[in-house]
C-alpha cells in the first residue's frame, strides 16, 4: 500500500456549551489511501463534523484537536487560514448534501465552476470558462454551453449535484469528501451521480470519503467502511467483510437491513447499549489493519 | 436565454407559462398599485372634507353675502353627494388638475413641478451617501458579528434612528457653516450666483455642470452637501442595519460553506456570493429609503430653507393652502407607491429565480 | 436568594410561579445586555423626571417670562441658560418630558387597540375579511408617515391632541400586520380548537386566548416605535403643528431657538438633545428586548 493521502490520528471536535462541553467527535483515527472510504453513522454521530474538521471548516465555536492530521506530507494543523484556503479546492474538496442550497442561487452555475479554477490556477476568464465547459462534459452533461449559463433553480437536483462535483474537482484535488451527496436526490438519479463521482475519482486516482447514513449504499460503493457512533469509530472493516463486523451497533445495523430474496418477518429494532457512549480505550486503527488490506 | 430545465422540453405549455406567468404577475401588480392609489386619493379627499376651514369662505372671504356664498358653494360642487364629489375629484386628478394654490395663485401642479427637482437633488445625493456607506458598513458589521466593528455600526444605526433630523440640521449648520465655514449656508445658491444658469433639469448642480459653470456648480454643491449628508446619515443608519441582518442570514447558508470548500477568498465569498444574494433583498430597502428621504425632506428643507417640495408643503400648511398640501401629499404618496412597484420590478430583474420562474 | 431559587425552580408548583419565573429568566437575560440596560435607565429617568417635575424644578420658571433675563448663558441660576423670553430652559425641558410622555402614552393607547381590532379578525377569520382588512392596511402603509401626519394635522388644526390623533392614524398599520401574523401562527393551535369545541365564541377566543399571546411582540414593537413617535411628534412641534406656545414642547422649543441659533446656541440645542436622548433610550430598550425575545443574548 502506498503512502496514504490522509492520515488522521486522535481527532476530537468539542463544542463548548453552557452545561459543559459537547464532544461531537472523540479520538477518531483512520487513514485514506487512493480508495473509497465510507463513513456510516446516524445523524449526530459526528460523521459530518469529522469531514468538516478535516477541511478546517468545523462550525464555530468548535475546538478541533488532533495528534496527527496529515494531507499527504502537509500537516493541516500547522496551516494558517490563508494556507488552508490554498489547499481547499486544490488538494481536498467537499461535496455537500443538497445542491439546492449549496449552489449560489444568483450566480450562473458555469461561473461557479469556473471560479474554483480561477482561484487556484490563476487562469483568465476564457481559460476558466473552457475548463468549466470541459468539466461539465466530464460529469456527463450533454449540452455544456447551455447549462453553463443556467441558474441553480433551473437545473434538476441530479444535475445540480453533478455541477457541484464539477466545481469541486476542477482544480484537481486528490481527496474528495462527499457528505451525503445523494440523500437529497431523487432515487432514480442517485446511482447516476454516484457512478459519475466514482468514475472521476478512479480516473484521477483520488481518494474519496463518502459520508452517509445509508449502510447499504456505503457497503456496496466503498472499499472500506468505518462505522461511527456517538462521535467515535466503533468499527473499521472491508466493505466485503461487513458480515464479520464485531461491534454490536454495526451488527444491529446490518440486522436491520432488509435483504432481497430472503423471506423474513419483522425487522429487528436496533437495541442501543448505553455502554457504547463510553470512551473506547484502544484506538481502533490497529484493528482495522488486521481486518483491512 | 433559454429557461428550460433538464428534461423539460420547449412545449407549448412551457412557452405559455414563460410568457403568460410574468404578464399575469405584472397585471396583479398594476391592479394592486391602482387600488392603493385609489385609496390614497380617498384619504386625501377625506382629509379635504375634514378640514375645519370652510373652503367657500377661503375663497369668498367672510364678508361675502349669503347669495355669493351659496353660488360658490354650488360651484365647488359641495351640494352634491359625497361620492359624486369624490368622482369629480378623481376626474380632476386624472387630468392633472390639483386646483390652484391660494399662496402662489398658480396651479398646484405647476408649483409641484417647479419645486420638486430641488427635493430630488437633495434626496438622491442623500440616498447615494446612504447606499455607498451603508452597505459596506452593514457587511463589515455582519462579518465581524459581536466584535467592535459590529458594536459601532449597531450603535451608529441606533443613533441614526433616534436623531431628530431638524435638530441635527441646526447643529450641523451651527458647526460646519457658522463656526468652521466648511460649507455654504441655507438655501440652494448664493445670491451672487442666482440666474446665471438656466434651469433645464431643475437640479442646480447638474444644470451648472451642463452649462459649464464651475463656480456655480461649486457653490451649489457647497449648499447641497450638508443637508444631503444629514439626510444621508439617516438612510445610512437604516441601510446599514438592514444589510447587516440580511448578510447574517446569508452567511449561514450552505452555499457559503461550499464556497469555502472551494477555497475561495473571504473577500469573494462576502462581497460576491453573500452580497450578491443580499442585493436582491436590498432593492426593496433602498426604494423604501428613498421614500422616507422625501419625507425627511420636509423637515430638512425647513431647516435649510431649501426651496423644495417639503418647504413648499410646510409653507402651504401655514397659509391654510389645502390644495397645495394635498397635492404635495398626493405626489409623495404616488412616488411611494411607484417606488414600491419599481422595487418589485427591479427585484424581478435582479433575482434570477423571479425572472424565470420554474 | 430564596426568592431567586423559587423563581428559577425548574419544577414550578403553580402557574403563577412558572409565569413569574419566565419573566425573571427574561430579566436575567436582559440584564446582560448593556445597551438595553442603558436604554432602560434612560426611559426610567424620563418617567421619573416627568413624574417629579415640580419637585426637580420650580414650575413657575418654566412659564414665567423674565425679559430682563432673556437669552442668558449657562449659570448657577439657569444651568441650561434661558430662552428668548427669559424662561429657564432646564425647567422647560423637565416639564417637556411630561408632554413627550403624554403623547407617547396616548398614541400607544390608540394605536394598539386599532391595530388589534384590524389585525386579529383578519388573521382569525381569513378569507375575504382578511383580504379586505389587509388591503385597507396596505393603503395606510403605502403613505409616508410624516407627510400623512402633516396632512392630518393640517386638516385637524394645530394642537397636541390633534398631533396625537394624526400620529396614531399613521402609526397603526404595522400593529395590524403584526397582530394578523401572530394570530395566523396560532389559529390552528390545538388549544384554540379545544376552546372552539367547548363552544367558546369567536370573540371570547380572540380576547382570552389570542390577545395575551400577541401582547409580548406588540409591546416590543411599541418600544421600538416609541422613538419614531417621539420624533414625529417633535417634528410636528418643530413645524408648529404640535403643542402650541407657551407649552414647553421640545420640538417647538428647538423651533424658537432656531432664531437665535448662531448667537445663543443652547436655546435650540438643549431641547433637541433631550429629544435625541429620549428616543435613543427607547431604541436601546426596544433593541435589547428584541434580542432577548429572539434568544440571541
Image (cartoon, coloured by chain):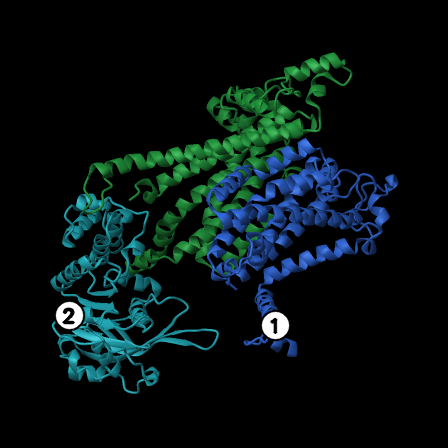
Mark 1: which secondary structure? helix
Q: Is A152 left or right of C110, judged from the image as shown?
A: left
* Drawing shade for chain C: blue
For residue A54, which quarter of the picture?
bottom left
In the rendered image, the quadrant that contains the C terminus of chain A is bottom left
Q: Quadrant of the N terminus of chain A?
A: bottom left
Occupied quadrant, residue C55: bottom right
**Pointer 1 local density, CA inside 10 Å: few below 14, some 14–19, many at least 20:** some
Mark linked to residue A68: none
Q: Is residue B168 visible to the viewer in this orientation of the structure?
A: no
Residue B246 seen in render: yes
Name the chain under label 2: A
Q: Residue at x 34, y 33 (%)?
A: B23
Q: Which chain is green?
A: B
Residue B170 relative to residue A175: left or right: right
Residue farthest toward the bottom in the current orientation of the protein: A281
Q: Chain of mark 1?
A: C
Q: Judge by depth and name the residue closer to the eye, B102 or B126.
A: B102
Tell me which residue sits at (70%, 36%) in the image.
C241
Residue A176 image point, x, y percent: 22, 64
Q: Which residue is mark 2?
A: A220
The x, y position of residue B354, in whole percent, is 34, 42
Q: Residues within 10 Å of mark 2 (few under 14, many from 20)?
A: few
Pointer 1 residue: C17
Between B295 and B137, the one lying in front of the other is B295
Are discs 2 and 1 located on one and the same chain? no
Mark 2 or 1: in front is 1
**Residue C248 horizontal side relative to residue A252, left or right:** right
In the image, B306 versus A19, the foreground residue is A19
Indicate the chain coloured cyan by its letter.
A
Secondary structure under the numbered disc 2 in the rendered image: helix
Amino acid at each position: 500500500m502506498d503512502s496514504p493521502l490522509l492520515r488522521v490520528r486522535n481527532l476530537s471536535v468539542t463544542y463548548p456549551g453552557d452545561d459543559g462541553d459537547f464532544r461531537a467527535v472523540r479520538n477518531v483515527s483512520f487513514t485514506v489511501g487512493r480508495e473509497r472510504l465510507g463513513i456510516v453513522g446516524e445523524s449526530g454521530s459526528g460523521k459530518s463534523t469529522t469531514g468538516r474538521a478535516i477541511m478546517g471548516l468545523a462550525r464555530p465555536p468548535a475546538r478541533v484537536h488532533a495528534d496527527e492530521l496529515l494531507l499527504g506530507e502537509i500537516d493541516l494543523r500547522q496551516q494558517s487560514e490563508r494556507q488552508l484556503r490554498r489547499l481547499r479546492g486544490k488538494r481536498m474538496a467537499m461535496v455537500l448534501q443538497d445542491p439546492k442550497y449549496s449552489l449560489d442561487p444568483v450566480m450562473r452555475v458555469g461561473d461557479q465552476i469556473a471560479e474554483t479554477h480561477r482561484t487556484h490556477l490563476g487562469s483568465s476568464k476564457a481559460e476558466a470558462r473552457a475548463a468549466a465547459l470541459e468539466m461539465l462534459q466530464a460529469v456527463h452533461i450533454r449540452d455544456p454551453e447551455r447549462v453553463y449559463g443556467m441558474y441553480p433553480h433551473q437545473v434538476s437536483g441530479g444535475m445540480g449535484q453533478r455541477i457541484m462535483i464539477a466545481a469541486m474537482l476542477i482544480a484537481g484535488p486528490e481527496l474528495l469528501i462527499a457528505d451525503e451527496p445523494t440523500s437529497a436526490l431523487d432515487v432514480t438519479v442517485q446511482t447516476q451521480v454516484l457512478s459519475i463521482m466514482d468514475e472521476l475519482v478512479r480516473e484521477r486516482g483520488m481518494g474519496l470519503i463518502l459520508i452517509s447514513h445509508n449502510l447499504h449504499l456505503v457497503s456496496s460503493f466503498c472499499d472500506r467502511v468505518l462505522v461511527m457512533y456517538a462521535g467515535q469509530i466503533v468499527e473499521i472493516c472491508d466493505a466485503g467483510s461487513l458480515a464479520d463486523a464485531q461491534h454490536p451497533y454495526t451488527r444491529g445495523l446490518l440486522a436491520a437491513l432488509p435483504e432481497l430474496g430472503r423471506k423474513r418477518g419483522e425487522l429487528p429494532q436496533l437495541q442501543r447499549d448505553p455502554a457504547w457512549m463510553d470512551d473506547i480505550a484502544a484506538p481502533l486503527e490497529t484493528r482495522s489493519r488486521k481486518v483491512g488490506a | 436565454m433559454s429557461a428550460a430545465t433538464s428534461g423539460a422540453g420547449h412545449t407549448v405549455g412551457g412557452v405559455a407559462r414563460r410568457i403568460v406567468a410574468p404578464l399575469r404577475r405584472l397585471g396583479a401588480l398594476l391592479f394592486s398599485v391602482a387600488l392603493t392609489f385609489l385609496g390614497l386619493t380617498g384619504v386625501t379627499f377625506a382629509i379635504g372634507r375634514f378640514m375645519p376651514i370652510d373652503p367657500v369662505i377661503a375663497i369668498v372671504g367672510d364678508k361675502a353675502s349669503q347669495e355669493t356664498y351659496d353660488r360658490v358653494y354650488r360651484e365647488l360642487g359641495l351640494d352634491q353627494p359625497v361620492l359624486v364629489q369624490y368622482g369629480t375629484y378623481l376626474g380632476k386628478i386624472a387630468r392633472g388638475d390639483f386646483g390652484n394654490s391660494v399662496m402662489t395663485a398658480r396651479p398646484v401642479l405647476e408649483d409641484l413641478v417647479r419645486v420638486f427637482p430641488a427635493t430630488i437633488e437633495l434626496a438622491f445625493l442623500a440616498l447615494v451617501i446612504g447606499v455607498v456607506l451603508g452597505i459596506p458598513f452593514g457587511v463589515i458589521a455582519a462579518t465581524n458579528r459581536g466584535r467592535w466593528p459590529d458594536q459601532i455600526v449597531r450603535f451608529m444605526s441606533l443613533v441614526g434612528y433616534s436623531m431628530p433630523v431638524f435638530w441635527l440640521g441646526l447643529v450641523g449648520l451651527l458647526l460646519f457653516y457658522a463656526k468652521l465655514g466648511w460649507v455654504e449656508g441655507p438655501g440652494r445658491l448664493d445670491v451672487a450666483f442666482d440666474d446665471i444658469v438656466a434651469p433645464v433639469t431643475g437640479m442646480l448642480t447638474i444644470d451648472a455642470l451642463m452649462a459649464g459653470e464651475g463656480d456655480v456648480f461649486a457653490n451649489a454643491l457647497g449648499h447641497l452637501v450638508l443637508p444631503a449628508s444629514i439626510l444621508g446619515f439617516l438612510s445610512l443608519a437604516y441601510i446599514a442595519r438592514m444589510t447587516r441582518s440580511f448578510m447574517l442570514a446569508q452567511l449561514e447558508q450552505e452555499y457559503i460553506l461550499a464556497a469555502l470548500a472551494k477555497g475561495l477568498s473571504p473577500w469573494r465569498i462576502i462581497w460576491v456570493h453573500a452580497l450578491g444574494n443580499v442585493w436582491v433583498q436590498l432593492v426593496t430597502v433602498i426604494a423604501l429609503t428613498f421614500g422616507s428621504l422625501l419625507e425627511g425632506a420636509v423637515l430638512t428643507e425647513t431647516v435649510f430653507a431649501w426651496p423644495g417640495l417639503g418647504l413648499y408643503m410646510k409653507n402651504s400648511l401655514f397659509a391654510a393652502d389645502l390644495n397645495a398640501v394635498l397635492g404635495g401629499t398626493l405626489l409623495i404618496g404616488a412616488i411611494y407607491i411607484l417606488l414600491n412597484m419599481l422595487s418589485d420590478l427591479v427585484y424581478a430583474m435582479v433575482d434570477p429565480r423571479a425572472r424565470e420562474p420554474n | 436568594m430564596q426568592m431567586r431559587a423559587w423563581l428559577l425552580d425548574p419544577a414550578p408548583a403553580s402557574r403563577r410561579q412558572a409565569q413569574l419565573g419566565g419573566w425573571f429568566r427574561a430579566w436575567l437575560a436582559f440584564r446582560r445586555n448593556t445597551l438595553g440596560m442603558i436604554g432602560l435607565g434612560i426611559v426610567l429617568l424620563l418617567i421619573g423626571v416627568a413624574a417629579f417635575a415640580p419637585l426637580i424644578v420650580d414650575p413657575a420658571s418654566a412659564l414665567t417670562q423674565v425679559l430682563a433675563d432673556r437669552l442668558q448663558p449657562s449659570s448657577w441660576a439657569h444651568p441650561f441658560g434661558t430662552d428668548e423670553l427669559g424662561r429657564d430652559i432646564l425647567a422647560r425641558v423637565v416639564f417637556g418630558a411630561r408632554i413627550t410622555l403624554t403623547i407617547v402614552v396616548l398614541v400607544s393607547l390608540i394605536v394598539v387597540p386599532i391595530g388589534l381590532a384590524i389585525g386579529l379578525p383578519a388573521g382569525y377569520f381569513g378569507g375575504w375579511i382578511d383580504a379586505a382588512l389587509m388591503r385597507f392596511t396596505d393603503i395606510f402603509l403605502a403613505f409616508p408617515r410624516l407627510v400623512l401626519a402633516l396632512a392630518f394635522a393640517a386638516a385637524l388644526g394645530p394642537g397636541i391632541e390633534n398631533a396625537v390623533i394624526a400620529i396614531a392614524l399613521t402609526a397603526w398599520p404595522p400593529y395590524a400586520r403584526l397582530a394578523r401574523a401572530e394570530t395566523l401562527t396560532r389559529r390552528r393551535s390545538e388549544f384554540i380548537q379545544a376552546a372552539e369545541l367547548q363552544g367558546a365564541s369567536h370573540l371570547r377566543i380572540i380576547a382570552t386566548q389570542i390577545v395575551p399571546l400577541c401582547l409580548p411582540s406588540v409591546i416590543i414593537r411599541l418600544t421600538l416605535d416609541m422613538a419614531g413617535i417621539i420624533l414625529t411628534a417633535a417634528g410636528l412641534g418643530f413645524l408648529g403643528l404640535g403643542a402650541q406656545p407657551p407649552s414647553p414642547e421640545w420640538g417647538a422649543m428647538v423651533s424658537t431657538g432656531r432664531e437665535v441659533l448662531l448667537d445663543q446656541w443652547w436655546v435650540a440645542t438643549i431641547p433637541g438633545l433631550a429629544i435625541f436622548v429620549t428616543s435613543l433610550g427607547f431604541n436601546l430598550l426596544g433593541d435589547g428586548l428584541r434580542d432577548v425575545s429572539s434568544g440571541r443574548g
